[in-house]
Amino acid sequence: MKIAFLGAIRTVTGSMHLLTINGRRILLECGLFQGRRQESFERNRNLPFDASSLEAMVLSHAHIDHSGNIPNLVKAGFQGNIYATFATRDLASAMLRDSAHIQEQDVAYVNKKRAKSGLLPVEPIYTRQDAVDSLNAFVGIGYHRTVPVTDGVHLTFYDAGHILGSAIVVLDIEENGHTHRLAFSGDLGRKERPILRDPEVIPSVETLIIESTYGDRRHDTLEEADRELRRVVNDTYQRGGKVIIPAFSVGRTQEIVYSLHHLMQDHKIPDLPVFVDSPLSTNVTEIFRLHPECFDEETNEFIASGNNRDPFGFHRLRYIRDVEDSKALNFLREPAIIISASGMCEAGRILHHLKNNIEDPRNTVLIVGWQSPDTLGRKLVEKQEKVRIFGEEYDRRAQVEVINGFSAHADRDELLDYVRHIKNGLRRVFVVHGEEQASLSLADGLRALGVPEVLVPEPGDEVEF
């Protein structure tokens, strides 16, 4: 068995790991690399393997840094199955088409500049039609339903508790007369979070590939996060301002809506309008409603308690699809909460809301997720005095607040606790999907637990065992 670590190695983007088992090649994840424009374009366009040589692909969840290059994979000649949970397949349908739309828009903008310089136009990495075509390769599997993937390899999904449909990938392998169980965490969620179930503990794992996004940090508790959200909303309301929340369309938006619903229901924040201004977030929320099999007991009880109770909708909440309705929010003068994508403030309608609100000291920009280096979101977290939006410089006069307790990723203590529960029989752990310091820190913690072999791969490393 060999594992080639091709993406999200000592960084948190472009997740991609290539397994070779019994001479057959299986790809775990096919994420979009997100960083500086030219580097991202080259890395995403040029896959580090022959796509037609792959037997199958397994997808842990639908976030773009794990799924976003699938249309390019299929366009490049991949003809196997892409195994995912049913909810992941539904989310991927919305997210991959949205990703393609953004790429087409970006390339149109770049080509205008290239034309002025007399340069030939470039093509997007993939188009919306490529995204639609790639959906034919998906095969949906329920949790705990074991299926054969290729010779000597059986796949089972367990709940990762990260986002809707997210899975811990378990491969039971027979090779050269030996059996082996390998688990890939995907992105591991947290215990006792609203809406979704807790991550499942997997028995008898010998090799684990684990994420380390927060491998060197600890989160606030949910109670602390709700308390901070309450404080930020009330303080901003007293100033007569708006709360602008950049949030990922999958998971974070729904969780923030859920918390605001309960805070308003309990009269802990004012009865003010809440807008979710993102077509993708709106579509994704509809997909959430289709998959109660992913909800925890508390959420299902809330829904079943009568009066058409909806965890993702309440009387002051409005979902915005139409562009004109989105533009109308720019003229809103009374206090309100606006949740919009993208989560790192790099694209989408959030940029317009920031442009129109960043220079007003009454307003608050509330950051509720990890921000990658070199993004506008990171610059806001750093509270830089001036920021560039759509190529123009703005004075940041709005307040900036950061709440880490809403993260859907397990933190350092939660990652170590998870491994502590499965470490009997665990031979080796590969630490991936984290900035270098986070990965190295988690690796030290795993060694302290007594894991026999812990490795933080370098990009492109291939390990055989």
Image (tube, grey):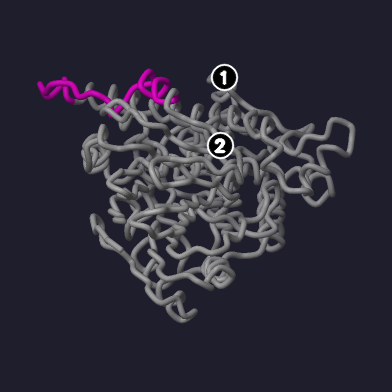
Callout 2: few (<14), some (14-19), or many (20+) C-alpha neighbours within 10 Å?
Answer: some
Q: Residue at x 36, y 68 (%)?
A: 437
Toward which corner of the image does residue 179 lie, by quadrant? bottom left
Toward the viewer: 70 or 205? Answer: 205
N-terminal-most mark, 2 or 1: 2
Q: Is residue 129 magenta?
A: yes
Q: In this figure, which residue is indicated by the disc labeled 1? A: 322
Number of marks present in the image shown? 2
Toward the viewer: 387 or 286? Answer: 286
Toward the viewer: 267 or 127? Answer: 127
Query: In what element is the residue under mark 2?
Result: loop
- Residue 120 shows in this picture: yes
**Residue located farthest toward the right when viewing the structure as drawn:** 306
Question: Horizontal placement of 284 versus 20: left or right?
Answer: right
Mark 2 vs mark 1, foreground winner is 2
Q: Residue at x 23, y 23 (%)?
A: 123
Question: Horizontal placement of 446 versus 267: left or right?
Answer: left
Q: x%, y% of residue 191?
A: 65, 60
Amino acid, disc 2? Ile
Q: In this figure, which residue is indicated by the disc labeled 2? A: 141
Q: Which residues are magenta?
A: 114-135
In 3D space, how far apart are the residues under numbered discs 2 and 1 (Cα atoms)? 34 Å
Callout 1: few (<14), some (14-19), or many (20+) C-alpha neighbours within 10 Å?
Answer: few
Question: Horizontal placement of 372 versus 78: left or right?
Answer: right
Q: Is residue 157 above or below residue 436?
A: above
Q: x%, y% of residue 129?
A: 38, 18
Q: Is residue 429 above or below residue 118?
A: below
Amino acid, disc 1? Asp
Q: x%, y% of residue 287?
A: 62, 30
